Amino acid sequence: MTIGTLIGLGVGPGDPELITVKAFRMLKECPVIAYPQKLRGSKSYAQRIIDVYVNPAEKEMLGLVFPMTKDEETLQEAWSKSAEKIYAHLKEGRDVAFVTEGDPMLFSTYIHLMKLMKEMHPDVPMKSIAGISSFNGTANRLGIPLADGDDHVAMIPATSDMAEMRHVIETHDGIVFIKVAKVLDDMLDLLEEMNLLEKTYVVTKVTSDEEIIWKTNELRGAELNYLSCMVVRK
């Protein structure tokens, strides 16, 4: 019996034209397209990116719900169910492309799925197709070089540890903070203290048709979407 291949497919930061030629080919060739699906049935970000390339009538569209909760039992049950739904196709010899915004090997849903599949079904062949990440999209959208020459650049999740955030800023020339929404005002206080507000940029859903490029004076108290990047370029 031939087992299908699970493919982690990076589809870029938001603009459908920013998928790679290889990703486009995989979307056309794979009989099963798996994607994160919102609980209420609305389209996920990754699903919207591939809409222009995939005809649902020609594919097996496999929507998978990954609940936003910290309850380990609930998470494990949901992830295991999703892995088994994918495996049901793989064991029949069908390749499955799991689409994820950005790159599949950088803070993506695919990473956990890949690890779980290795545990549950180690016989499944897997590969990933690189995608353009949001920090690449943000730098190019803003026209800001993240690094040049011997510059040091960092890409990290923002946390409430402002001492650590200060250290990162002090020791790098360019910094991209993801997951910044929950600590936005604290980050703004820190950057103001460091006289770096004028060198700070925030973009939500970069390159997509919902993109927002924020002005620094609009940010305090704003409720940022999860898909927001903060760039500090000294």
Image (spheres, rainbow, N blue to C red):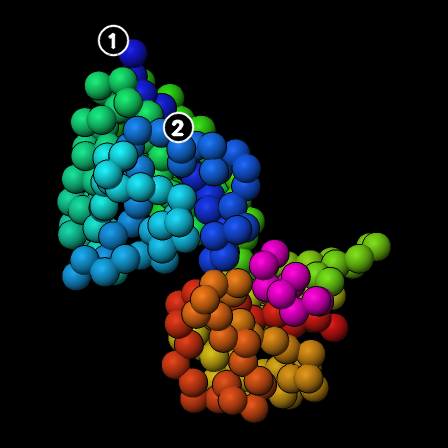
Determine the CA span between mark 2 and mark 1.
21 Å
Within-10-Å neighbours for mark 2: few <14, some 14–19, many 20+: some
Taking depth in this image into account, of 157 and 143 the one nearest to the observer is 143
- Looking at the rendering, the stretch of residues picked out in magenta corresponds to 136-144
Quarter holding residue 79: top left
Q: Which residue is mark 1?
A: 1
Identify which amino acid the numbered label 2 is placed on.
Glu
Residue in the foreground of this view, choosing between 175 and 190:
175
In the displayed structure, 24 sits above or below 163; it is above
Residue drawn at 74 percent across, 73 percent down: 234
In the rendered structure, which amino acid carries the disc numbered 1? Answer: Met
Label 2's element? helix
Residue 127, compared with residue 76, is above or below; it is: above
Identify the element where label 1 is drawn.
loop
Q: Residues within 10 Å of mark 1 (few under 14, many from 20)?
A: few
Where is residue 213 shown, x and y percent of the image? 54, 76
Q: Which residue position is annotated with label 2? A: 29
Between disc 2 and disc 1, the foreground one is 2
| Residue 136 found in image quarter | bottom right
Q: Position of residue 226 (x, y in %)?
A: 40, 67
The residue under the point 16% across, 52% down is: 74
Q: Is residue 60 above or below residue 40?
A: above
Label 2–label 1 contact, CB within 8 A: no
